[in-house]
């Protein structure tokens, strides 16, 4: 993989991680367009590194909220910060379970499965369309809604289903305030990403070849910078109920991906 290709893929990941259009799906499409012939394991390694970059950009954007959460945790009181942290942990459980028991099956999806990506993008489009028509509320994330949102996040491990799109849409459909939904969606994935990277590093499923370091590094930087921009932009878009535009986009890209694959 060349540096230019790594930068392009990094930008794609940085933008699409936060915008509800499926970062994993767009990465697979971009790899296919660029002619990337990596094995599924190598493809997954690059994907994980880019997700790590966007996780760091999330920490930068929400650094004040994260500091407040940690302060609340160490007060050892049943306060709002402790409850929020427990909701984050609860939301992680479905994805952790899926990741542990179906890891090999998930890895197999990250190897140019463009037809699958197309169908999953259409599902994302439908989710966004329904969410955009939901009424605005001022409700917070409850423990029940946190678990349901976590199930959506687990399903979004499939390339083509937008993680942010699925979790934000589920939150809004459950009656959660749009801004709170976006905040919860972006923060709930951070522990999962760091946990996934730690597990893969210790388990040896992620390998860094010397000839990959340069491409991984520039891809990481591109994803981090693009992520900073996209995160702020997405929060603004959710407040303004602009998800239907992304619904149309996902539907069009999904149809194109399916058509190109079936037509050879």
Image: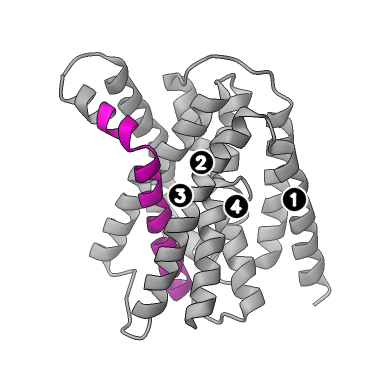
Which one is closest to the eye, mark 1 or mark 3?
Answer: 3
Q: Which residue is mark 3?
A: 228
Q: Which residue is mark 2?
A: 232
Q: Earlier in the sequence, mark 2 or mark 4?
A: 4
Query: Could you tell me which residue is drawn at 71 percent across and 64 percent down?
Result: 115
Position of residue 134 relative to residue 245, above or below, is above
Q: In terms of secondary structure, where does tag 4 sit?
A: loop
Q: Which residue is mark 1?
A: 249
C-beta proximity under 8 Å, tags 2 and 3: yes
C-beta proximity under 8 Å, tags 1 and 2: no
Which one is closest to the eye, mark 2 or mark 4?
Answer: 2
Q: Which residue is mark 4?
A: 22
* Colouring rule applied to residues: one colour
Magenta run includes residue 43: yes
Q: x and y percent of residue 27 in the render?
A: 57, 64
In space, the residues marked 1 and 2 are separated at their CA atoms by 20 Å
């Amino acid at each position: 993989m060349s540096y230019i290709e790594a930068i392009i893929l990094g930008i794609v990941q940085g933008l699409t991680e936060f915008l509800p259009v499926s970062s994993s799906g767009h990465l697979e499409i971009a790899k296919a367009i660029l002619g990337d012939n990596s094995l599924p394991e190598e493809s997954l390694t690059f994907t994980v590194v880019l997700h790590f970059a966007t996780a760091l950009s999330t920490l930068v954007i929400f650094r004040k909220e994260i500091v407040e959460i940690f302060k609340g945790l160490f007060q050892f009181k049943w306060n709002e910060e402790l409850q929020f942290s427990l909701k984050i942990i609860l939301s992680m459980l479905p994805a952790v379970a899926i990741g542990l028991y179906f890891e090999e099956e998930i890895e197999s999806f990250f190897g140019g499965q463009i037809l699958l990506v197309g169908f999953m993008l259409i599902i994302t489009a439908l989710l966004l369309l329904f969410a955009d028509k939901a009424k605005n509320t001022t409700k917070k994330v409850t423990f029940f809604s946190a678990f349901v949102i976590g199930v959506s996040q687990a399903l979004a491990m499939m390339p083509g289903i937008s993680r942010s799109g699925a979790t934000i849409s589920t939150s809004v459909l459950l009656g959660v305030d749009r801004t709170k939904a976006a905040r919860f969606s972006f923060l709930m994935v951070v522990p999962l990403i760091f946990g996934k990277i730690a597990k893969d590093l210790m388990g040896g499923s992620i390998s860094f070849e010397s000839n990959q370091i340069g491409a991984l590094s520039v891809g990481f930087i591109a994803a981090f910078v693009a992520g900073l921009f996209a995160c702020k932009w997405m929060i603004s878009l959710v407040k303004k109920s602009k998800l239907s535009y992304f619904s149309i986009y996902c539907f069009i890209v999904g149809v194109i991906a399916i058509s190109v694959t079936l037509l050879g």
